[in-house]
Amino acid sequence: MKALVTGSNGFIGSHLAEALARRGDEVFCLVRKTSRTDSLAGLNVRFVVGDGRDKESLRPAVRGMDVVFHLAGVINAVDWPTYFEANTQGTQNLIEACLEENPQLQKFVFVSSISALGPSPCGKALREEDECRPVSDYGRSKLMAEKIVLGLADRLPVTIIRPSNIIGPRQKELFESIKLLAKRIKPLIGTGEPQTSLAGVDDLVRAFTLAADSPKSRGQIYIVTDGQAYAWRDITEAVAEALGPRRLYLKVPYPVQYALAAVAELGARFRKTPPLLTRSNIRATREYCWIYDGSKIERELGFKPELDMKETVRRTVEWYRKAGMIK
Ligand SMILES: NC(=O)c1ccc[n+]([C@@H]2O[C@H](COP(=O)([O-])OP(=O)(O)OC[C@H]3O[C@@H](n4cnc5c(N)ncnc54)[C@H](OP(=O)(O)O)[C@@H]3O)[C@@H](O)[C@H]2O)c1
């Protein structure tokens, strides 16, 4: 199978490219001229240069592909135009390029997010058919992209995946916590109650391939989780445990985290780079729950999540240690 992966050099895209290459697919990795590609080093993949914001650059990339996995997007940006251009316009450009250059495409898998659906009531898992009420610009830009994709479902076989929070080696948001904890700074995240669904990156990649391979997934939306709900503090504790024996930490309360995020956003505006921490991220962990029911993909496509949260956190910390990025 010839597969194009957009966002291929990112956290999830690089795991997908590796898994596809391992199973013998011909993998084409869409990257930008400016993209760092170390995450794809040594893989049996080919590179194609394109930018989601430039439709003409996407035309040659989609020609002759059997499947397109569309992961390119921005999760943290300083303003709405950046979310809109990357997540909404980028998706529209890519799917239109597919329709115009490759109408025989077997599957267009669009990677959206549970942020398009919005937060859940605490203690109740949301499903695919629940009303979408995004609370962030990120979520709104993904929901608009979903509508564009679904609007073309009669002309192209499309499937939408809504991953919950994903953990695994190279995950950036978890790395921010790992760096802080490695410096003995512990942000007191969340309320202490179960507030979020999670999925492991390897599980998510299996969900993508199931969606790509199955004709049943046409026109469908699937949430991917491991079926559990976690307290943010359990995840922080798992990181602390993976870093080593019990240590003393400087505990950082919510208002300080919020102020630091404001500073990070200001710095990002000056540097014109994506902020690693935003006030919206901080509020998301305090004010809302993000709990979802992932049983539809299990029922319809036979997906079986295998995440072991503590073990995945341990492997992630180990990966950052081996890469020399933490001590
Ligand atoms: N991580 C999660 O927990 C999570 C959860 C739910 C959904 N998702 C979704 O999954 C997808 C992948 O997430 P990730 O965590 O792997 O993100 P990531 O590591 O930040 O990677 C984002 C990728 O998108 C590319 N990209 C951004 N703007 C682009 C553009 N205009 N044209 C072409 N490529 C562009 C980036 O390329 P450059 O290197 O050139 O910037 C990078 O390869 C995203 O769509 C995200 O919304 C992620």
Image (spheres, rainbow, N blue to C red):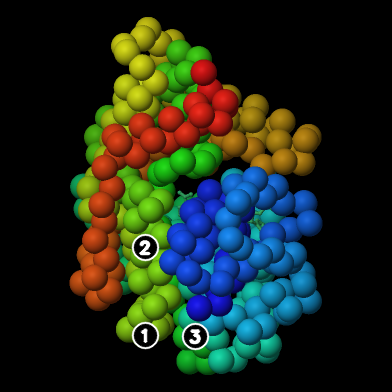
**Does label 1 or label 3 sit earlier along the sequence?**
3
Q: Is residue 58 visible?
A: yes
Count neighbours of disc 3 (C-alpha within 10 A) and say few if under 14, some if 14 to 19, many if 20 or more: many
Position of residue 220 relative to residue 251, above or below, is below
Q: Residue at x 28, y 69 (%)?
A: 297
Residue 187: where, in percent of width, then height? 43, 22
Quickly name the residue at label 2: 206
Nearest to the observer: residue 161 or residue 139: 161
Q: Is residue 139 visible?
A: no
What separation in Å lies between label 3 and label 2 (alpha carbons)?
18 Å
Q: Amino acid at mark 2?
A: Arg
Q: Amino acid at mark 3?
A: Gln
What separation in Å lies between label 1 and label 3 (alpha carbons)?
9 Å
Quickly name the residue at label 3: 106
Tag 2 secondary structure: helix
**Does label 2 or label 1 sit earlier along the sequence?**
2
**Does label 3 or label 2 sit earlier along the sequence?**
3
Tag 1 secondary structure: helix
